[in-house]
Image: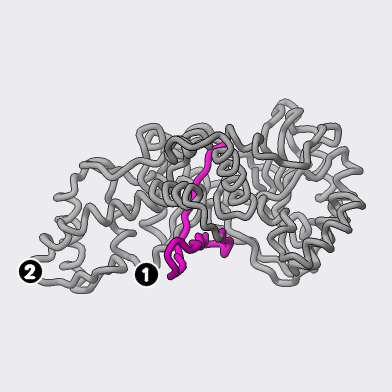
Amino acid sequence: MDTRPNALREAAAFAARVGVRNVTFLPRGLESMPAEIGEFDYIICHEPFSSLPAHVQYLVLQQLKQRLAPNGVGYLSYQCGGTGHRGPASASGQRPVTTDRGLRFTQVADRLMKAGLQYLGEADFVTMLPSNLGTSAEQVIKRVSQRGIVAAEQAMDYLRRRSYRETLVCHGDVRLKRRISVEDIAPLYLSAATQEMRSSTPGGAARYQAANGAYVTTSSPALQHALKILQARYPARLTMRQLMGTVGPVHEADRTRLAYSIFSACMSGVVSLALSPLPVGAASSHPVAWSVARDQAVRQRWVSNLQHRLVLLEDFPLHLHAISLLDGKLDLDQLAASLAALVASRASTLSTGEQTFRSHSGIRAQLMRAGPLLVRDLAKLGLIADEPARRL
């Protein structure tokens, strides 16, 4: 829904280009929501909630209450104290820019309660964990948390100097379990993209660090093996049972310790959790890039991957051009020929990050050798789709 005709036309055109057919675009605002629209499992309000007029904020919460299914989840993005903060991008790449001073989290929680809703959590779960703030800050949060989760979250905003939130809400009468255990993550899927930094001493600890700065340091061979498996198979996801199965036969006590170690890695943000496996394909003779990424690669230097995350390829134009060509009709030889013609026509260079290709004889042979590696890189970035994702 949107009140801007141009935005709706652009969205409808984008959906048509990438083959999405299960979307309806409504040219209306919240105040004219049709009663027959029904209930939804997930409702998104991506424009910053804090910048809306008070009566529109009320309408947003009123519609969330009326339209959310009994176990539905609502999403609100808003400033929580900063000025002029640029919020995180949506899957469409739009980054909301606001200049208001925002709302304190306690204010948002109070408005939710008055609307019959309650705070569920943050879209980025790791930001809710005081253990990631350091020992002294964690002790402060533990004391404050005796007054409830709202007080604890407000205190963490101050300690993090956070200015932007992506908050999840639900009905006020839903009973929530706030303490998460290792058993809770057993049915979920795990993934990790980490860089290993090993100690120089024999048998020493290794540090595994994620792109978000979170890290785990461990000397446990079993945990090191598990993290290496997740890294090798990334962006594919494994269940806890599948991951434990790669470690080999170990004593039950050791399996329990490993399960808790993996759980700790999840809580630190090194290992990501998901509800379902990722529809990522592998490099093949006729690779197919996800249709959304193919469309975006023609127009810009970032694309959305199958994890719904932005992949910036500004320094790798060869990858961008390859994505736009990978529609399943070209084999690697034909892909190399198309890229070679592109370089020759531009009389310029293209880089993969590891190798630069210039306009000269033999470039097709070079690209033939680099093609499988290039497609492998795109698969690791979550941009090569499997068969269901190709059909959207």
Magenta span has 197? yes
Task: In this rendered view, identify the residue nearer to me: 102 or 207.
Answer: 207
Q: Looking at the picture, which amino acid does disc 2 mark?
A: Ser
Task: In this rendered view, identify the residue nearer to me: 76 or 281.
Answer: 281
**What segment carries the magenta color?**
188-216
Q: Secondary structure at mark 2?
A: loop
**Nearer-N-terminus badge (1/2):** 1
Residue 92 lies, in percent from the top left, at: 53, 52
Q: In the rendered view, would you say 242 is above or below 266?
A: above
Residue 213 lies, in percent from the top left, at: 57, 64
Q: Quadrant of the C terminus?
A: top left
Residue 24, can we see it?
A: no
Q: Is residue 192 found left or right of 164 in the rendered image? A: left
Any mark on residue 361, and which?
2
Q: In the rendered view, would you say 34 is above or below 227?
A: above
The residue depicted at 71 percent of the width and 27 percent of the height is 38
Residue assigned mark 1 = 315
Q: Is residue 19 found left or right of 102 in the rendered image? A: left
Residue 370, picture quadrant? bottom left
Q: Quadrant of the N terminus?
A: top right
Residue 3 lies, in percent from the top left, at: 67, 48
Q: In the rendered view, would you say 50 is above or below 229?
A: below
The residue depicted at 69 percent of the width and 42 percent of the height is 28
Question: Separation of disc 1 and disc 2 at Cα?
Answer: 24 Å
